[in-house]
Image (spheres, rainbow, N blue to C red):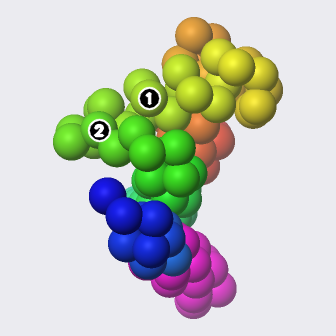
Amino acid sequence: MKAEHSEILIQHRLEQARNALNDARILLDHNGSSQSIVNRAYYGMFYSALALLQKLGSIPSRHTGVISTFDREFYHKGIFPKRLSNAGSGTLFNNLVDRVSE
């Protein structure tokens, strides 16, 4: 993929992430359902992960591939704390769901 196309896609994913997180905030502020809040927050993180992976030029075709590639590229290399990785208590994505459930 050409660099300019890649940058456009990265910006698109970041915009999707901002929109999803903004939706989560609106739902939270207006007593939305926990399920809807978590869904929007999850996808905010997911779209951010897609943007980071696009920057690396490594875009898996499946949802689970995005999560495992993100773990490999960012947790296992020490960029994010290992306590949030799949090897420990689950991915950052799963930790969000667990914390909201508490």
Question: In the drawing, what numbered circle is on residue 69?
Answer: 1
Apparent side of residue 76 relative to residue 71 in the rendered image (left or right): right
Depth check, front residue: 94 or 61: 61
Neighbourhood count class around disc 1 (C-alpha, 10 Å): few under 14, some 14–19, many 20 upward = some
- In this figure, which residue is indicated by the disc labeled 2? 60
Q: Earlier in the sequence, mark 1 or mark 2?
A: 2
Residue 52 in percent (x, y) is at 56, 51
What amino acid is found at the position of numbered circle 1 in the picture?
A: Thr
Which residue is at a point 64% across and 31% down the rendered structure image?
74
Which residue is at a point 65% across and 17% down the rendered structure image?
76
Which residue is at a point 53% across and 53% down the rendered structure image?
55
Residue 13 part of the magenta segment: yes
Farthest residue, direction front: 2
Which residue is at a point 51% across and 76% down the rendered structure image?
11
Q: Main secondary structure of the magenta part?
A: helix
Cβ atoms at labels 1 and 2 below 8 Å apart: yes
